[in-house]
Amino acid sequence: MSAHPLVRVDGLMKRFGTAAPVFADVHFRIEEGEFVCLIGHSGCGKTTILNVLAGLDEASDGTVLFADRELDGPSLDRAVIFQGHALLPWLDVESNVAFAVRSRWPRWSAQQVLGHVAHQLDVVGLRHAAKKKPSALSGGMRQRVGIARALAIQPRMLLMDEPFSALDALTRGTLQDEVARLCAETSQTVFMITHDVDEALLLADRIFLMTNGPDARIAEIVVNTIPGPRRRQDVHHHPAYPALRNHLLDFLIERSRGFDAGATNYDPKNPPEIRLVA
Amino acid sequence: MTRSLGVRAAALSLLIFVLFIAGWYLATRGGPGVATVDPAYAKLVGAAAAGGGKSAMPGPDVVAATLAKHLADPFFDRGPNDKGVGIQLLYSIGRVFLGFGLAMLVAIPLGFVIGLSPLMSKALDPFIQVLKPISPLAWMPLALYTIKDSAASSIFVIFVCSLWPMLLNTAFGVATVRREWLNVARTLECKPLRKAFRVVLPAAAPTILTGMRISIGIAWLVIVAAEMLVGGTGIGYFVWNEWNNLSIANVVVAILLIGLIGMALDQGLAFAQRKVSWVE
Ligand SMILES: Nc1ncnc2c1ncn2[C@@H]1O[C@H](COP(=O)(O)OP(=O)(O)OP(=O)(O)O)[C@@H](O)[C@H]1O
Ligand SMILES: [Mg+2]
């Protein structure tokens, strides 16, 4: 672990009103260029953590350092891919991406902006749909536009909230491959929420496992011992895959319930790091 | 099939129109058999109508002739009580546009403020609730007293009646912009004005246009009444004046034109609404 990780979260806690905290005592670091997945059951506070990292929400307690600086609201450094794609429906695909590009580089000429947009649409294979409105696109194409919009501003970090959960299995697979390729090419730092164990093992370098809410914690951090580049067609043949997958599933089914944060061998500042090899 | 549905609907419309005109013609044709009019009424409507054995209600042929006469020379101006119907309509349309435009300038920015600020929304709510149900014509005496000008007073009345639907629809449209889109603007570090014009305005535009459409409809209803009240110029005054002249054919022509202009105003905004609407 480096002394200066890109993201450093300490003692994060969030409560709504006077109820029990949704999660508490959350500590983690994300290194530059790392792909991290967060897995946990519904309602444990994953989206809330992502929104805090994005600067869209504020934690009740704790600190978030981004590039050694305290987080202060949303920033172009951190692009968000929303679960519901969140494209602006009155703009066509090109203008949706251009809107982000103009925000990032306000002084660029129209020609520069359109050139950059065209390149980004090429990257996600959507050049032909540039003049279409989001309503005329399939779910997978919309999510691609969302990815193009996020990558277009060249963020230091990409935040994704279950980006593929609304898609059919086939489309999801293709998009997972594309995201894996794009992020590996540019060593993009990514924080992604998912419910899908296979998706996490394909994409993530490390997987944070969250216990059930309320008062959820990061129970353990699983290191993906399958070396990159991982591809969908062969990742599940790797000898370490069954052990990793079983470990994650066992956590979701069994250990995420009734987790004892007071156990003597559990240190929330350093959750156990699990390295499984075949 | 939609095409054949359209064709059949048009044919039916035409049939209804022809039947209506025919019925109208037969009902007003009069003749010896129906010449027995109530003498008091005959006196009231004038010797021509009573003596000629004709009903006072003009038939479609008379109205059509009157309409043709008006359309042939709509813009003549022979003094305060004798102006072409075109001039009178232009007066009314001008007042509606002025009052409506002023209301837009107030209602849309204010609606933005109310929609964006829950505090302002709560603070202004009691005033809006009380002012909204007041008939715009109830303001007329107050306007005449303070402005001391009949034309400006009718514009003020149009302003008042156009204000509320636009204000409330703008506020509603702005307040219900999807949180996700605002978050997109936030993560892109959009400046407040850019966010207002590039995200909130287009998102709320269809709702705002709905308010404008309601407003222009009400304004067109109210201008006729307002001009009847204050007199001078305008299509409302024209109708009242022709009633005093007992020229029912002119009244019918004016009613027809009021309907057509009202439809055109509504269709214009409906077109604008289609231009700014979006599907998710
Ligand atoms: N604005 C709010 N007011 C009150 N409670 C809230 C609010 N937002 C979230 N919560 C609560 O916080 C908890 C965590 O919500 P969050 O959306 O972060 O869960 P999640 O882990 O992302 O779940 P999912 O997997 O279903 O998306 C939930 O129990 C939810 O009810
Ligand atoms: Mg969530």
Image (cartoon, coloured by chain):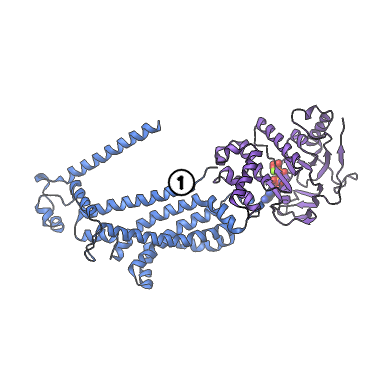
Picture coordinates of residue A128, whole percent (x, y): 58, 37
Picture coordinates of residue B97, whole percent (x, y): 39, 59
Vertical comparison of A184 with A16: above or below? above
The residue at 66%/44% (across/down) is A82
In terms of image quarters, where does ligand 2 lie? top right
Q: Is residue A201 left or right of residue B43?
A: right
The quadrant in which the C terminus of chain A is found is top right
Picture coordinates of residue B183, whole percent (x, y): 64, 51
| Chain coloured blue | B
Q: Nearer the viewer, residue A184 or B270?
A: A184
The residue at 76%/31% (across/down) is A231
**Would residue B135 be seen by someone viewing this image from the given angle?**
no
Picture coordinates of residue A180, whole percent (x, y): 73, 37
Q: Nearer the viewer, residue A238 or B10?
A: A238
Q: Disc 1 sits on a residue from what chain?
A: B
The residue at 46%/48% (across/down) is B273
Vertical comparison of A17 with B31: above or below? below
Vertical comparison of A191 with A69: above or below? above
Secondary structure under tag 1 reads helix
Residue B142 in which image quadrant:
bottom left
Chain A, colour shown: purple
Residue kind at label 1, given as amino acid type = Arg
Name the residue beneath numbered marker 1.
Answer: B274
Q: Is residue B111 left or right of residue A64?
A: left
Residue A266 in which image quadrant:
top right
Q: Nearer the viewer, residue A67 or A159?
A: A67
